[in-house]
């Protein structure tokens, strides 16, 4: 993992603080960050970068975590998946395609603007998750009914994403926030049983995490209720999940389960409606659950409501640094 080294905790820049937190080394304070969707599938990479940079600079986050709101487009003429033959139409995609090219342009612009001393983290969705955004979440069951054709489709997208990760390293980004739905448990509407997890999620997760070696890999177990045990053996530097959602492990439980850096602590579903004292209290509680500032990154469990006020977000930031 690039960026590693020993630093004086009292005189850290943001990248040093980030990598120290990932290693469990002393820090002056836990890195703090939040992120939001900006509906960027409708804009080009330059405008995307402008929005991401405004969010980063306005709050002076410790990490520049760039959202990726460009969505995969199905093969031409295909509205959705109606059967196994449709799955076989999915092939490797060129990185010049809009869903990849605009995001790469955005990341290059952000990297140039923030310089080398700020950690830049890309957001990446797992293959199955990405495909459902393209064809509709209602098609999940149909896809799983045809494992051979589904495997061909998922392998093609995974191959494209491996190539994409190579481009991320050349920018360079410092890490990837990798979101997987593979931990959601039945009987939730999007719950995934053990067999489906092993067949349609785990192999592709592992292939992509292997391709990310050398970057800071943050595995984000998305949704609830979660079986966090499914990703505890994944090769990564940090684990993230919405620890405040019903049915999910707390930060304290996560600390007992793993020695990796933990990332989370704040309820993203309530941040926009809470008073400032309530926000401060939740930050204090999260840091206490984590056992202190070391080996911890404080953030909402997932993307925050776009209506969250500037003063609420500034309060979140200052509660950590104070």
Image: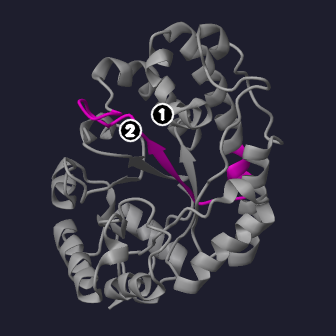
- Name the residue rendered at 44%, 28% in the picture: 201
**Label 1 belongs to which residue?**
205
Residue bearing mark 2: 234
Label 1 to label 2: alpha-carbon separation: 8 Å
What percent of the width, then of the height, locates residue 27? 36, 78
Asked if the stretch drawn in magenta spans residue 262, the answer is: no
Instruction: Find residue 298 and report its horizontal and vertical position in percent.
Output: 35, 71
Q: Earlier in the sequence, mark 1 or mark 2?
A: 1
Residue 134 drawn above or below residue 141: below
Up the image or down, 105 lies above or below 198; here it is: below
Q: Secondary structure at mark 2?
A: loop
Write the residue at 31% across / 54% down.
Answer: 260
Residue 251 placement, left or right of 86: left
Q: Is residue 287 above or below residue 86?
A: below
Q: Is residue 26 visible?
A: no
Res 225 → quadrant: top left
Q: Which residues are magenta?
A: 166-190
Q: Quadrant of residue 67?
A: bottom right
Q: Position of residue 124 (x, y in %)?
A: 56, 47
Answer whether residue 184 is visible to the viewer in this image.
Answer: yes
Q: Is residue 168 magenta?
A: yes
């Amino acid at each position: 993992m690039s960026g590693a080294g020993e630093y004086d905790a009292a005189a850290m820049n943001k990248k040093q603080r980030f990598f120290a937190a990932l290693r469990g080394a002393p820090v002056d304070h836990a890195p703090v960050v939040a992120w939001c969707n900006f509906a960027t599938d409708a804009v080009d990479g330059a405008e995307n970068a402008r929005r991401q940079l405004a969010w980063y600079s306005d709050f002076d986050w410790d990490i520049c975590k760039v959202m990726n709101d460009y969505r995969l487009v199905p093969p031409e003429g295909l509205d959705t998946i109606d059967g196994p033959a449709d799955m076989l139409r999915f092939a490797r995609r060129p990185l010049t395609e809009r869903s990849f090219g605009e995001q790469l342009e955005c990341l290059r612009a952000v990297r140039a603007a923030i310089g080398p001393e700020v950690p830049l983290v890309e957001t990446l969705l797992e293959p199955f998750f990405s495909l459902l955004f393209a064809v509709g979440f209602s098609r999940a069951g149909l896809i799983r009914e045809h494992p051979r054709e589904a495997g061909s489709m998922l392998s093609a997208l995974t191959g494209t994403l491996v190539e994409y990760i190579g481009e991320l390293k050349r920018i360079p980004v410092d890490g990837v926030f990798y979101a997987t739905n593979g931990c959601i448990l039945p009987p939730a509407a999007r719950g995934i049983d053990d067999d489906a997890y092993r067949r349609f999620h785990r192999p592709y997760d592992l292939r992509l995490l292997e391709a990310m070696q050398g970057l800071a890999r943050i595995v984000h177990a998305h949704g609830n209720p979660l079986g966090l045990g499914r990703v505890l053996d994944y090769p990564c530097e940090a684990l993230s999940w919405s620890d405040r959602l019903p049915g999910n492990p707390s930060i304290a439980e996560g600390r007992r389960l793993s020695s990796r850096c933990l990332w989370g602590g704040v309820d993203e579903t309530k941040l926009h409606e809470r008073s400032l004292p309530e926000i401060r209290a939740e930050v204090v509680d999260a840091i206490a659950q984590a056992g202190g500032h070391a080996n911890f990154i404080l953030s909402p469990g997932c993307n925050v409501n776009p209506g969250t006020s500037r003063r609420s977000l500034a309060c979140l930031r200052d509660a950590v640094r104070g």
